[in-house]
């Protein structure tokens, strides 16, 4: 499975960092690990791509998680992502 790394500007000098699994435009089985520095305590979470299932319209779906990251994220190196991850996990952090 393809893995790519991105960051997206949030405000000021704050970025979200993404480790994306699946590839550009790949919604089936795609997901991304997100490192979020917006709060006082960094947060790390996983966002999955859930394709729409017409036979189960009440089931949660999200076709755009990793796709949007490819469209608007700034590509970064694996090392830059790892630096952000290490910074987030160096003290107190939340996993969601």
Image: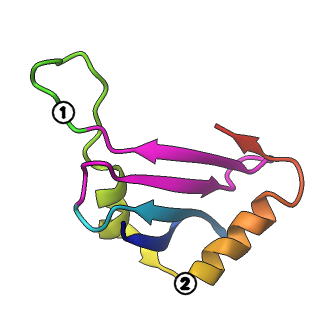
Label 2 CA crowd tier, 10 Å (few <14, some 14–19, many 20+): few
Residue 6 among those drawn in magenta = no
Question: Where, quadrant-wise, is the C terminus in this rendering?
Answer: top right
Q: Residue at x 16, y 28 (%)?
A: 53
**Residue in front for this viewpoint, 91 or 53:** 53
Q: Residue 35 lies in magenta, yes or no?
A: yes
Where is 13 relative to 67, above or below? below
Task: Tell me the residue at 87%/48% (across/down).
Answer: 92
Specify few, some or many for label 1: CA neighbours under 10 Å numbering under 14, 14-19, or 20 or more.
some
Give the x, y percent position of residue 84: 70, 69
Q: Which residues are magenta?
A: 26-50
Residue 77's tag is: 2
| Secondary structure of residue under mark 1 | loop
Query: Does residue 19 appear in this view?
Result: yes
Identify the image quadrant of residue 36.
Answer: bottom right
**Residue under label 1:** 52
Residue under the image location 87 percent in, 61 percent down: 90
Residue 42, percent across and down?
74, 51
- Image quadrant in which you'd find residue 61: top left
Residue 68, x across and y down, in percent: 32, 59
In the figure, is residue 44 to the left or right of 63? right
User: Is 25 displayed left or right of 13 in the figure?
Assistant: left
């Amino acid at each position: 499975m393809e893995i790519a790394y991105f960051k997206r500007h949030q405000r000021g000098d704050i970025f979200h960092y993404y480790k994306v699994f699946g590839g550009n435009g790949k919604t089936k089985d795609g997901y991304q690990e997100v490192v979020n520095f917006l709060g006082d305590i960094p947060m790390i979470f996983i966002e999955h791509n859930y394709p729409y299932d017409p036979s189960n319209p009440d089931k949660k779906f999200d076709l755009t998680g990793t796709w949007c990251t490819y469209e608007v994220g700034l590509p970064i190196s694996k090392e830059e992502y790892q630096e952000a991850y290490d910074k987030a996990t160096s003290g107190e952090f939340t996993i969601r």
